[in-house]
Amino acid sequence: MTADRLYELLPAVHRRRDAEAGEPLRALLAVVQEQADLVEADIEQLYADWFVETCRDWVVPYLGDLVGYRVLPGSGEALAAGTEAGRRLLDAVAGRRDVAHTVGHRRRKGTLALLEELAKDVAGWPARAVEFRTLLGVTQSVRLHGRDPRADRRRLTRGRTADLRHTDALDRLDGPFDALAHTVDVRRLSSARSPRRYNIPAAGLFLWRLKPYPVTRAPAHCDDRARTHFTFSVLGNTAPLIAKPVEEPAPTHIADETNVPAFIRRLAFAERTAQYYGPGKSLCVYVGGEPVPLQRIVPADLTHWRYHPKNDQVAIDPVLGRIAFPVRHAPAKGVWVDYHYGFSDDTGGGEYLRPLSVKRPSAFYTVGTAKGNDCHEIGAALRRWRTDKENDPKKREAVIEITDAGDYHEKLVIELDHGDRLTVRAAQGKRPVVRVLDRYSNRADSLEVTGPQRAKDCEAKPRLVLDGLLVAGRGVRVSGEVGQVVMRHCTLVPGWSLDEHCRPEHEEEASVELADTPACLEVERSVLGSIVVDVNEVREEPNPIWLSDSVLDAAGRGLAALSAPDGRPAHATFNARRTTVFGEVLTHAAGLVENSIVDGCLRVERRQHGCVRFCWLGPGSRTPRRFHCLPAEPLPGAPQRVVPRFTSTRYGTPGYAQLAVSCPVEIRRGAEDGSELGAFHDLFQPQREDNLRLRLDEYVPAGCDAGLVIVT
């Protein structure tokens, strides 16, 4: 549609007279056309609202009502909110797929494969349905055996007696893929206090909350003690690999180990190596740019590196994420890997899709080792930008984009001037690693961000954005007159680096240091270590610090996640929304702290201003006025019951910062909208679990005891 669509419908004589008069009629019709376009767009949207695939979010429950869809709790609150958080909650409690498949699900009511479809449509979780009746030990009739074909089929589908020679079946014992016979347990699977699985009417739904995140063509880490020992993780830590789920062949198919994001077992990898290994599959190893052939891959247990492969073999341990080459046959051209790791949400550096600015500034530089990039190093792109902006002031706004998942060993100094707007980001689908290592023996190293020494009143302070990076080896130090430092979807490794057991090697060191700078620090969907604020409290205002949907990890018990260098409260204003903090927070003031967990004391010096609401705070906290915070003050001498429990509190392990299944319900549902507290609030896992239970009650036949079993 053209801008003068209505004006062009007029006869040519009127347009000619209007042009002679200065085109007042054209200006009037342009205003009318704006309203006509709005009405036309609304009419087109009304037609789109008849279909569940294209309708607006608020129409989904109404379309569901036409087919008798049972609206789940929370839809009304989400519609009334009208905010971004309300939209995400509406997607969690009234999914389009659940509404679209309502009629089909009713036709398949009572089938086992339907339970897996419900988990995918309602909760968005991969699942495996198991009928525990078939795993009960039953004495077969000797008379019917060999005479009735149906008896033989029933015998083959039931659980078998444990065979000590069948190690793979023993390895799957009591898991979602267990195939051994069990004795009956009459307690119900859906019991809230003591659930048990193996009963005649029991049907369980095993759920995987962790998502498989890919790492593509990333450099492997070589062990310093042996040139033939490598780890899939570029940080050198051992981490279990997760299978890349394969789509099930038919709707009636029951998921197996290749259809869900399960941890890859050694025996499963040995039996089905071709299903897991190869380009585009769960894992792959490249030497000199070419994948290692499948016939050379040997599954092995590389605990303590005791296994030594032969001269033409490459050993892989999927449980520890390790690779071993033959002795004295170290690859000379480098090792790259593809693999998948498990994490809860799109937080920290990763290859997942993240929002990027569509606007492309005049100063745009690409960094990478492939041909066609502007520079091969980040430092070279910074030097080129500094030269270009001196010649052209329009290039003060620049973007440096890293186009691969390489490991950049550089001494980076980002020098900013007045009016600069610099973004250093990873390309979509890439996770580069910026490793800041020792370059000088007589002074400390870090990723330096320096601003001008004195601010000008006529020009704005510089701004730096780090997006999609993984920074290891050292932290980020900000000094000078910097206005704003933004970290989005970044990982600043807590403790700088990890050992092979995911323990931080420098647990007392800070990931971010604000030194004599008025910079405002904004952290969004990131993982970082402790923050140290070292400013002049007399001359400077408190540094604003904003954290949202992030993890702030002090990397050690009893350490401060936010403080001054000498352990005093930081001269900062602490703000946190949907954040998990491991360690103490010592700050001058607090703004808004909500829906967060501070696994340590939160001590605020200036308590006259600020608000802390819907949070869990460690004992000994001194805060501004609280609203619906946990825990309540216990009786003298009484043990503390409401304490957060996590799957893991060590970065680099699956389930890091994830609330455990055994976490108290007051924390798992302690947010203002009934979701969990902490960094993964927007997953709305309690609402998903409740909705899935309601759907099970609706589609499971009467008399069947259906329940949920959380695997990861």
Image (cartoon, rainbow, N blue to C red):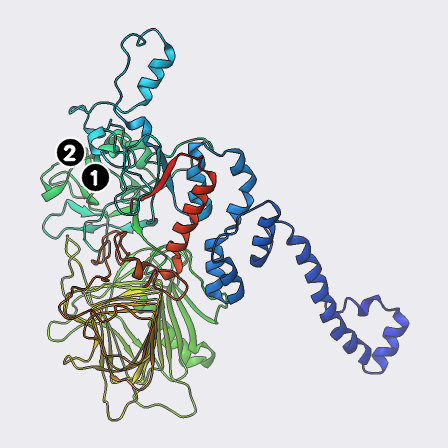
Q: Amino acid at mark 2?
A: Asn
Residue at the (21%, 42%) spot, across then down: 319
Position of residue 537 relative to residue 41, above or below, is: below
- The residue positioned 33% from the left and 42% from the top of the image is 190
Residue 89 position in % (x across, y down): 46, 59
**Mark sitting on residue 180:** none
Where does the N terminus fall, quadrant-wise? bottom right
> Quick one: label 1 or label 2, which is nearer the N terminus?
2
The residue depicted at 49 percent of the width and 68 percent of the height is 360
Name the secondary structure under disc 1: strand
Tell me the SS state at disc 2: loop
Note whether 322 is above or below 663 in the view shown.
Answer: above
- Judging depth in this view, the residue of 292 and 392 nearest the camera is 292
Q: Quadrant of residue 663?
A: bottom left
> What is the crowding at mark 2: few (fewer than 14 residues within 10 Å), some, or many (at least 20)?
few
Is the residue under label 2 in contact with that under label 1 (CB below 8 Å)? no
With 620 as the anchor, is 84 left or right in this view? right
Location of residue 681 with respect to 594 vertically, above or below = above
What residue is pinned by disc 1? 316
Look at label 1 and name its amino acid.
Ile
Residue, disc 2: 311
Counting from the top left corner in percent of width and height, residue 462 is at 37, 81
Residue 684, percent across and down? 40, 57
Residue 601 in view: yes
Q: Nearer the viewer, residue 664 or 634?
A: 634
